[in-house]
Amino acid sequence: MKADFVYTKYAEKKMGFLFVDHSLTEALFFSDDEMLGSICTATVTKIVPTMGAAFLEGPEGLVLFYQLKENEGRHRILRKRGSKNNGMIPGRYEQISVGDTILVQVSATPQKGKQAEASANLSLKSDAVVVNCSGQVGISKKLRDPERREELKELLLNILREETESEDFDGFGFIARTSAAEKSDDELREVSIILLCQLRELIKRAETTPEHKWLYRNSNTPEAYVHQMVQRGLYEETAVHTDLEWEDPAPEGYRLNLMSPERENPGIIFNLPTLMEKAMNRKVYLKGGGYLYVETTEAMTVIDVNSGKNINGKSHEESALEQNLEAAAEIARLIRLLNLSGIIMIDFISMKKPAHDGQVMGELRRCTAQDPCQVHVVDMTKLGIVEVTREKKAPPLRELL
């Protein structure tokens, strides 16, 4: 597979567009002030027991929604209400009170009608490993080799055992990401210990940090995105095309095509306006003659597959299977491109043979496996509706634009 990454201005925003084998697959917004994953001190302003949540005030007046049950036993309280900073080590308490200063990480950005969300489970990540405060070791579900999974788990557990002899590292945990399978044990050990030390020092620094201050800002840059993409090794060839400033003059693993803003517009060259207009329509046509209806509500996204004018002389069952397989690949692309998340219900064309249903489910799982967000193809209901869930990390594309 070949990947082309186009970094340009679209709708007055700095955006990146990923083409896989000439098909528009992903659209990303690159903000100069990225919030997701950033760590800050915040003050508890309100506790709502009926919601099981608290509201926090973060830096620059940012309002954060904080789930109490989800963070139970993890609250990192820097200063209790009415007390001064006395050099106490941030601790975990059963309860928090209005006026307390706590240490949190932004786990979800503000979206339409909703505040940003915060979590006490702080984490830092590289392309291969995540260090967090879970006290556990986890392995990416996308890493399917059972032998390598066990090797990675044992390696990370040993690192924790070695490093947590000191109380400074007690309570930390790791997650091995998909690309960890391709790394050597020495590489993983080095990056894991570096991240572990960085997170420990960050928590210590929080002791003397005033309220409403950022301690760590997440780097969300097109250069970092491309490097991670190359390191994952998904594509045989990767090229970057941009008419904006690129801070990596000597890239490794991909070809850089710097374009002149006065002479060349990568958006026009790659036909972005037309492709984006088609993708944003409720009705999306398939090459085989069928089409999809994509309807997003507050509760879920519903996708309906229709046969349209596809008359190819085959039996209904053969034709339905062919169209559903094509639709599965297109749906996986649209989910990623439109950044759909939460509950997604798909109504494929009805088929009589259970084996054909299995083929369509397998194709949907295969195509969604390339998605950088976690996608879970759950099952097919008795009514023939396929249930899918996708991890939510950022607002959907329609809302963003």
Image (tube, helix red, strand yellow):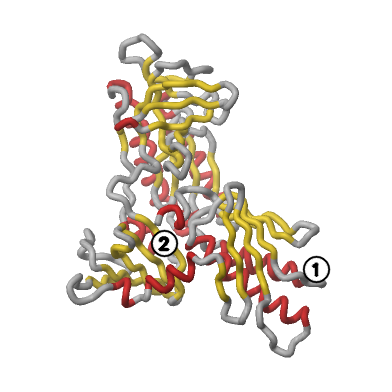
Please indicate whether residue 243 sits to the left or right of residue 395 in the image.
left
Quarter assignment of residue 348: bottom right
Quarter assignment of residue 81: top left
Give the camera-side residue of 55 and 221: 55
Q: Which residue lies furthest to the top in this view?
A: 82
Query: Dot 1: few (<14), some (14–19), or many (≥20) neighbours within 10 Å?
Result: few
Element marked by disc 2: strand
Q: Which amino acid does label 2 sit on?
A: Ala
Residue at mark 2 to residue at mark 1: CA–CA distance: 35 Å
Quarter assignment of residue 109: top left
Residue 227, percent across and down? 34, 60
Name the mark nearer the viewer: 2 or 1: 2
Q: Residue 27 carries which label?
A: 2
Q: Mark 1 points at which residue?
A: 354
Work out whether 104 lies above or below 238: above
Residue shown at the point (56%, 62%) measured from the top left: 369
Residue shown at the point (45%, 26%) measured from the top left: 55
Q: Which amino acid does label 1 sit on?
A: Pro
Work out whether 186 lies above or below 68: below
Residue 96, percent across and down? 48, 18
Residue shown at the point (39%, 51%) measured from the top left: 187
Q: In the rendered image, which quarter contains the C terminus?
A: bottom left
The numbered mark, 2 or 1, whose residue comes first in the sequence reads: 2
Answer whether residue 45 is visible to the viewer in this image.
Answer: yes
Element marked by disc 1: helix
Please indicate whether residue 263 sits to the left or right of residue 129 in the image.
left
Answer whether residue 146 is visible to the viewer in this image.
Answer: no
Work out whether 345 lies above or below 169: below
